[in-house]
Amino acid sequence: MSSKKNRPVQVAAGAVVLRDSTTGEPEVLVVHRPAYDDWSLPKGKPRPDEDLAVTAVREVREETGCQIRVGLPLGSSSYPIGKGPKTVHWWRGHVVSEHRWKKSSEVDRVEWLPVSKARRRLSYEDERGLLDKALAAEPTGVLLIVRHAKAMERKNWSGGKDWKRPIGTRGRRQSKRLAGLLAAYGVAECISSSSTRCVQTLRPYAEAAKVDLVEVDELSEEAFEKKPEGAAKAMRRLLNRVRQTMDQPLAVCGHRPVLPTMREAIDMPHKPMLTAETQVLHVDGEGRLVVQETVKSKF
């Protein structure tokens, strides 16, 4: 029998969901769990191979009927449970829509509470700290940089020019999974290199979410070889849009040789990316990086 020290960490994800109120005091979404007779922030365990940001959005919807998008990551909280240690990863949640909620054996009450009342009602000190952290956080915008999904090997491609080369079977699985991640952040528009493999990487999400998928020639490998500054200018335009709107997350898909310039153009240090990897940049109103998340594909 394994000791408690060697038990695997149980992982979960949740969100601190805030909204404005007519009183001027923000309200926070909290739930009551009858099995524990506690009041807490909505959270839950991931499904197999589910990205944690996706888990947070799904759990909030299932427990409260509230559809959210995640924004700034708020870190994690850890504590022991019967099965061993547990770590919950948290995000700031932004309300997209609210739907009819039905109580269950897991959650029997859902309330929007003024934050002053929520601090008294929440059962756990670490969650009260998370609430304070979410309230103190500065507004941020989100720019997601994606490396295209796995493409057909060049040696196997007989369809003419390389920009037409499509994603392969693995790439299609990656792009389908990516759609869930982009949905979790509420991506409002997809921007892609005009190369087929980049467009196909973002298309499943764009079609499902009914958002624009804009092709930008300057982000393609071919255009980059001729005029690198074109990709840099395109990225600066995108960052400017994000910092001006703040609540309209954008996703941009590019190629391995172009990605260093794409990041350096907006003063973000470059880190090598795997196929279908996503780097989520949270930026302030001046376009400066506040925090970065890296989400690697599991396919």
Image: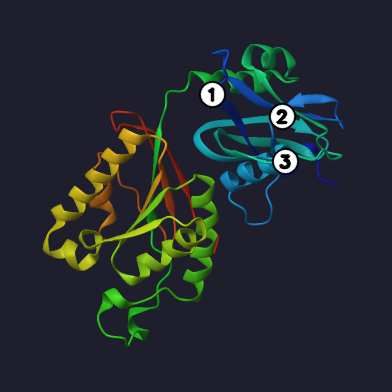
Residue at (31, 34) in percent of width and height: 244
Q: Quadrant of residue 241?
A: top left
Quadrant of the snapshot with the C terminus = bottom right
Q: Who is closer to the viewer here, 45 or 239?
A: 239
Q: Is residue 53 above or below residue 228?
A: above
| Residue situated in front as seen by the camera: 137 or 264 | 137
Describe residue 228's horizontal placement relative to residue 266 as left or right.
Answer: left
Residue 261 appears in the figure: yes
Q: Residues within 10 Å of mark 3 (few under 14, many from 20)?
A: few
Task: Identify the residue shown where x is 46% and y is 46%.
Answer: 294
Q: Considering only vertical position in the picture, is 86 above or below 171?
A: above
Which residue corresponds to mark 2? 79
x, y percent for residue 201 = 42, 64
Label 2, label 3: how far apart the Cα atoms are: 32 Å
Residue 96 x/y as whole percent: 55, 39
Q: Are marks 1 and 2 in contact (CB under 8 Å)?
A: no
**Label 1 belongs to which residue?**
134
Residue 287 image-quadrant placement: top left
Crowding at dot 2, Cα within 10 Å, few <14 / some 14-19 / many 20+, comes out as few
> Quick one: label 3 or label 1, which is nearer the N terminus?
3
Q: Secondary structure at mark 1?
A: helix
Name the secondary structure under disc 3: loop
Label drawn at residue 100: 3
Is residue 249 left or right of 73 when viewed as pictured?
A: left
Mark 2 element type: strand
Q: Are marks 3 and 1 in contact (CB under 8 Å)?
A: no
